Amino acid sequence: MGRLAGKVAMITGGTSGMGAVTARRFVAEGAQVVLTGRSVQRGEALAAEIGENVRFIAMEAGDEEQISQAVDFTVATFGRLDCLFNNAGAVTHSSRIEKISSDQFDYEMAALVGGPLFAMKYAIPIMRQQGGGAIINNASTAGHRTGHGPVLYSIAKAAVLHLTRVVALQIASTSIRVNSISPACVATPVFSLGTNMTQEQAAASMPIIERELAKIVPLGRTGTSEDVAAILVFLASDESRYITAQDIAVDGGLIAGYTPAETMEKFGGMHTALQAELARMNDA
């Protein structure tokens, strides 16, 4: 039997990238899955490709009514809801703070923070009735450290990290576990943001993205959507039944700090200057 046998999962933003790979992995582990996304064509094609244990429903990430309908659809289709993976999001603004508009702020906050919040709002009563469940929010290392993403994206992901903790402890007595993951340097076409590449051009440039990301990851390689899916299977399964209010960084060690080589690169100049100063003092 698979690690998710008998479980039903809803994956928002499930029609591409990490969401699509996770859907395939969940089904392989025995789960039934509902995917949400904006592209009906892509969503229905993916559901048909994976097979009878997958359904698709169109959903806008920040629309409370559509989120509620997606949760209802999941329960009506498969009879329950054991796992919610809040993966949907959008990166629409990569400029400096001086250029951010209120419309851009409203859109990204609704999609990146409102999406998980409202999905949990409607999933929790169902899971409480069932006696438990697992909720996983997709955060980011950009929520932990500056310089890992655009302004709006970074502050939204920081909010997701704290939202996860707040809700986890609010409902801990119900046996519903709420955790988050913080991926970084997972090679996807999103890294072409700001280059004016088309989707096709970005996809064709993946070898370059992988090569350049590997240079900054302590493990020396980029992450893959399969790496993320493996953690999600664990958090969705009963194997993680004693874990809640936690964030797992799937980042190859990126946010832990500097490697010895990076430390020498950043502070080597000061060491050299001090040695020169010591030599000058000894000669005086």
Image (cartoon, rainbow, N blue to C red):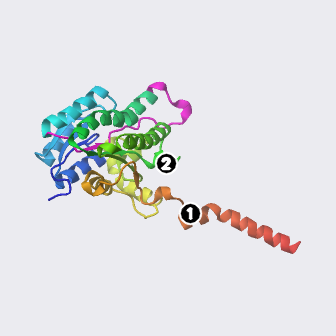
Instruction: Look at 20% across and 39% down and name the residue there.
Output: 43
Dot 1 lies on which element? helix
- Asked whether residue 89 is drawn in magenta, I would say yes
Instruction: Look at 35% across and 37% down and name the residue there.
Output: 116
Give the Cα distance between marks 1 and 2: 20 Å
Quadrant where the image shows the N terminus: bottom left
Q: Amino acid at mark 2?
A: His
Extent of the magenta region: 79-103
Q: Which residue is mark 1?
A: 262
Query: Residue 66: which quarter of the image?
Result: top left
> What is the x, y in percent for residue 19?
28, 46
Residue 129, numbered label: none
Q: Nearer the viewer, mark 1 or mark 2?
A: 2
Q: Which residue is mark 2?
A: 144
Q: Amino acid at mark 1?
A: Glu
Q: Label 1: how many residues lie within 10 Å, few (<14), some (14-19) or many (20+)?
A: few
Q: Going by the image, does 240 lie left or right of 160?
A: left
Q: Main SS type for the magenta part?
A: loop
Query: Residue 252: which quarter of the image?
Result: bottom left
Q: Residue furthest bottom?
A: 283
- Asked whether residue 221 is drawn in magenta, I would say no
Dot 2 lies on which element? loop
